[in-house]
Structure formats: C-alpha cells, structure tokens
Amino acid sequence: METRESLNPFRALLKHRNFRYFWIGQTVSLIGTWMHSIAQGWLALELSNSALIVGLVSAAGSFPVLALSLPAGVLADRYSKLRIVMIGQALLAIEAGALWWFVATDNITIPWLVALAAINGVIGAFEIPARQSLLVDLVVREDLMDAIALNTSSFNLARIIGPSIAALVIAAAGLAWCFALNALSYAAVLVGLGLVRLPPWIPPKHRISPIANMKEGIRYLIRTPEMAVLMRMVAVFSVFGLPYLTLMPVLARDVLGLQAAGYGVLMTMTGVGALAGALFLAAVGSRIRRGRLFAISALAFPALLIVIALTPVAAVSAALLLLAGLGMILNTALANGLIQSIVPDALRGRVMAAYVMVYVGFSPFGSFIGGALARAAGVEWAIGGGGAVMLLYSAWALSRNPEVRAL
C-alpha cells in the first residue's frame, strides 16, 4: 500500500480508482489528439501552401476558447461535470470522424478545414473547464496536486508519442488515417469515463441567473488577492512564454542551421523535460512548499528562454530546451494546482474556465506578437524579448505579493 511518504509519482493512480480509469483513457485519447494536430497543420499547408492559412486554422481552434470559456464555466458549476465531459468527448470524436471523411473522400477544402477547427474549439471551450474542475472529484483534495501533475504528464507523454506515430501513419497510409485514429482514440476516454463511479450529482440550490453566476465568479477572481496575482502571471506566461514553442521551427532552421529532423529532436527534448517536470511534481507531492517552487519556476523559465535566444550551438540549445520544458511545466502545473487549492468547490467551474480562457485563449495573441517581432527583428529577439518581459513581470509581481510564495 502506497503512503503519502512514498516518492512514487503514480501513487494517485494506485490510490484512486476513478482517477486511474480517467487518466488511462485520457492518455490514449491525447495521443490521438496530437496526431490530429500534426496532421491538421500539415493538411492546411498542403491545401494552401501558406503560413497565414496554417495560422488561421490554428487560431480558429483557439478563439472559441477565449469567447466561450466564461459561459462554459457557469455551465460546469450548474450541471454534472462528468456528463459535460462525456458529451464533449463524444462530440470531439464525431468532429474527428467528419474530418477523416472529408480528407478520405477528397472533399476537404480550406473553408471546411477552418470550420471543423472552429467546431473543435467550440466543443473544447465547454469541455476543458469541466474536465479541469472534475479532477478534484476523482481524488481527494489532499491529492489534487498529484492528480494535476499526472494529468500534465499525460499531456506531455502524448506530446512525445503522438507526433512520432503521426509521422509514421502519414508516410504509410496518408493524412486521413491520423484523423481516423484520433476518432477511434476517443473510445478509450469514453470507456474510462463510463467506469467512473461518483456519488449522485445534486443540483445546486437557490440558483441565480447565469449572468449573475458569471459576475459572481469574476468578482471572486478580482477580490481574492492570491487568485488575482496567479491569474495575471498565467496571462503573462501565456502571451510571452508559450510562443517560444510556435517559433521553434524558425529558431531551428535560421539560427541553429538544423533541418526537420533536428527540429524534431529539439521538440522531443522539450517534451522530455516537460514530462520529467510533471513526474517530479507528482512524486514530491506535498513535501514541498508549492508557492516557493512556483516562484522559482516563474523566474527560472523566462531566464532560460533568454539564454536559449543567445545560444547559437544546437547541442547546447537542446540541453537548455530540456530544462525549459521542465520549468514550463512546473510553472503551468503549479499555477493550476495553487488556483484549485484556493477556490471553493461552488466556484470551481467558473474559476477553471477563466484559467482556461487566459491560458489557452490568450496564446494566439502571444504567437502573433512573437511572429511579428521575429519577422521584424529576428527570432532571437522574439524569444529572448518574451522571456525578458516575463522575467521582469514575475520578479515585480512576486516582490509585491510575497503571500504567493507562502501558498
């Protein structure tokens, strides 16, 4: 029997049956999702031969999250989160199946590709906040950070495996089969969710209007000092930190002189570092002061981006990207965990919806800013400049709000 003293990063899976079924199913499904993402970007390029269209397809999947996450959070707090997630996953399977049909029958066009990406984004805008706020129901509050860390490890494990499988499938069978396999992969998460056994869901009493619900959540975010600081730091991270991943192909080719295989190695190193960070966090659990580690990661990650921007040697960059992946995931998972440890259960869906809106919905703006700066001044300035902004803001925010380090 595992105890809280164990350093086994998978102890939350051993302790909690519901979380175990959810995690296994989600990991399989996320591998399919990464295959879908890789194939969709390549398909957009094949159809258009335009980087602008590739960006448009990506943005079509992101902007619905920005527009719809707050209403989705109200829905997550008013209805069964498990049911919302199951419905969302089933709809995502249908969307992937539709994309497979369009590609397999040679009926796919750029408008259809953009429309299906937008539909995927709309479904995700409602499903992601419900799934994020469901985690606490699958474990106990004391194990929530472990579950969030393992959830993050699932995403990064899939990020390593999914693109590799996608490359093999595209070469052997064509793009369409990446979408078909993604559609099939949703069966795993739906089976896992079907095996989850939770107490009967009880509707909240004394419901107010959805608009009032939304305002209540926003007031909580603004008036809770620690929550406001964390959300602002997540926003700065999303806009100025995440774009380094989007700019990685340019860095690999134009600065480090690498080809596609070298770019793949750099992204793999980032994924390995991220997976290591997630497993480390799941292993140490409550042994560490999470606020202090968050503060360290909030300073270390942007500092690493600055050094990466100044490094012209591919081997050194690969090692730095491994560390950056680790720092990035520590920052992301700890911010998520600290927010979920503060929020009361009655507001969890709305707060996690705001987190998803900021983290996912703001990232296209960061990619646009980073891309424009890379074109005007060079990719080194885009990555290093984003790191500098994030480093300066994090140092200022943490010095002004020492209570964050005490969380």
Image (cartoon, rainbow, N blue to C red):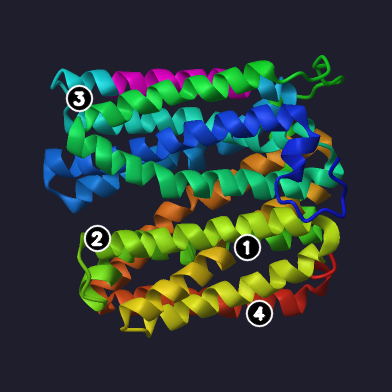
Which of the two discs, 2 and 3, labels the residue nearer the N terminus? 3
Which of the two discs, 1 and 2, labels the residue nearer the N terminus? 2
Name the residue at the front extreme: 1
Q: Secondary structure at mark 2?
A: helix
Which of the two discs, 1 and 4, labels the residue nearer the N terminus? 1
Residue where numbered disc 4 is placed:
395
Amino acid type of the residue that numbered disc 1 sits on in the rendered structure = Asn
Q: Is residue 131 left or right of residue 49?
A: right
Q: Is residue 243 visible?
A: no
Amino acid type of the residue that numbered disc 4 sits on in the rendered structure = Ala
Magenta residues, dominant SS class: helix
Assign the C terminus to one quadrant of the image.
Answer: bottom right
Badge 1: few (under 14), some or many (20 or more) residues near its Cα, within 10 Å? many
Q: Is residue 70 visible?
A: yes
Residue where numbered disc 1 is placed:
331
- Label 3 to label 4: alpha-carbon separation: 48 Å
- Label 2 to label 4: alpha-carbon separation: 37 Å
Which of the two discs, 3 and 4, labels the residue nearer the N terminus? 3
The image quarter containing residue 338 is: bottom right
The residue under the point 44% across, 37% down is 31
Look at the image and say whether residue 86 sits in the magenta stretch. yes
Q: Position of residue 388 (x, y in %)?
A: 50, 80
Residue where numbered disc 3 is placed:
103
